[in-house]
Amino acid sequence: MIELSAIAWVALIAAVAAVAFFYSSVGHGGATGYLAALALLGVAPASARVAVLITNVLVASIAWWQFRRAGHFEGKILLAFAIASTPCALLGSNVHISAQTYKLILGSVLTAAGVVLLSRSRWQTDAASLRKFCWPAALVIGAVLGLLAGLTGIGGGVFLSPFLYLFRWVEPKTTGGIAAGFIVVNSVAGLVGTGCVKMTHAGPLLWLTVPAVTGALLGTHFGAKRWSNSTFSRVLAGVLIFAGGKLLLEART
């Protein structure tokens, strides 16, 4: 049973809404942010995992829908990643290992990717700057990221975005649409692997879906329709640095 004071609940609701706003604006579900907020209030990750996955699915679904409507999506690229990632996410959700080294390495990678992205004031998106998509590489990356998503209980979009940026397979905002779809399929796979019994134990934390959906509706409006590519890239950089920093802090505990 999760027991929080009234003040803690207000703080948690505000934090979840803010996380959903910024994460969804770049096509992410916000699982790392929700887990960080819950951890600060003393809620163990194991107790929050199912509720966070469900919230992740809802927020990422809104982001996926909004980015697709705005024309920022490539179905074939998502399919390449999802084919390999979904079964691996299902497998990873049933594996329990020490994640300290994983958090240290991945936190460093995400932080570095965010810093590199932040250092570039503009991301050139003309046709000449994009590279040809490589299916074999996408399948390998998808399998690895799917396994990591299952192990950590998040959708994996925060892992995928740096790779899409690094390889320049799509334009900046299209990374949002692809990452959102990637999060949905992996989070659903993670929920299936968790089992129906554990889903019923999410309890009062499921109320977090309300501020999360509200934040996502606002965030995706700005991310998909209002922000420029450079603003989108800066927000994405901030999300990556936050997620990477969170993992690095966890690795030290």
Image (cartoon, grey):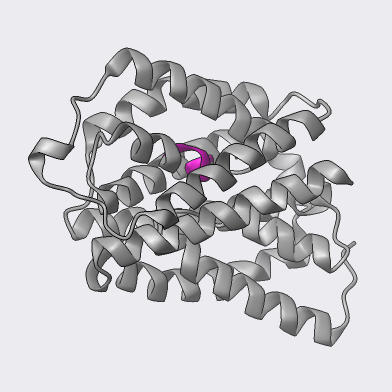
Q: Is residue 242 left or right of residue 129?
A: right
Out of 31 and 123, give the one closest to the viewer.
Answer: 123
For the residue pair 226 and 228, the one nearer the viewer reads as 228
Secondary structure that dominates the magenta span: helix
Q: Residue at x 59, y 67 (%)?
A: 209
Q: Please say whether residue 90 is visible from this viewpoint.
A: yes
Q: Quadrant of residue 187?
A: top right
Up-down relation of residue 72 to residue 104 (above or below):
below
Number of residue marks: 0
Decide whether residue 126 is among the magenta residues. no
x 36%, y 67%: residue:
220
Can residue 195 be seen in this snapshot?
Answer: no
Q: Image quarter for residue 227?
A: bottom left
Residue 42, percent across and down? 88, 64
User: Is residue 158 inside the magenta stretch?
Assistant: yes
Residue in view at x 86 percent, y 54 percent: 44
Q: Nearer the viewer, residue 5 or 251?
A: 251
Q: Quadrant of the N terminus?
A: bottom right
> From this viewpoint, which residue is outermost toward the top?
136
Residue extending farthest left? 127
Give the magenta-colored segment's residue range.
Answer: 156-160
- Vertical relation: 133 (above or below) 164: above
At 32% across and 24% down in the image, what residue appears? 80
In the depicted structure, whether residue 138 falls above or below residue 245? above
For this view, does 42 lie left or right of residue 172?
right
Please state the horizontal and vertical placement of residue 169, each as a whole percent of the image.
Answer: 25, 34
Residue 206 x/y as whole percent: 67, 64
Residue 193, image x and y in percent? 65, 30
In the displayed structure image, the side of residue 77 where residue 196 appears, left or right: right
Q: Is residue 11 above or below residue 231?
A: below
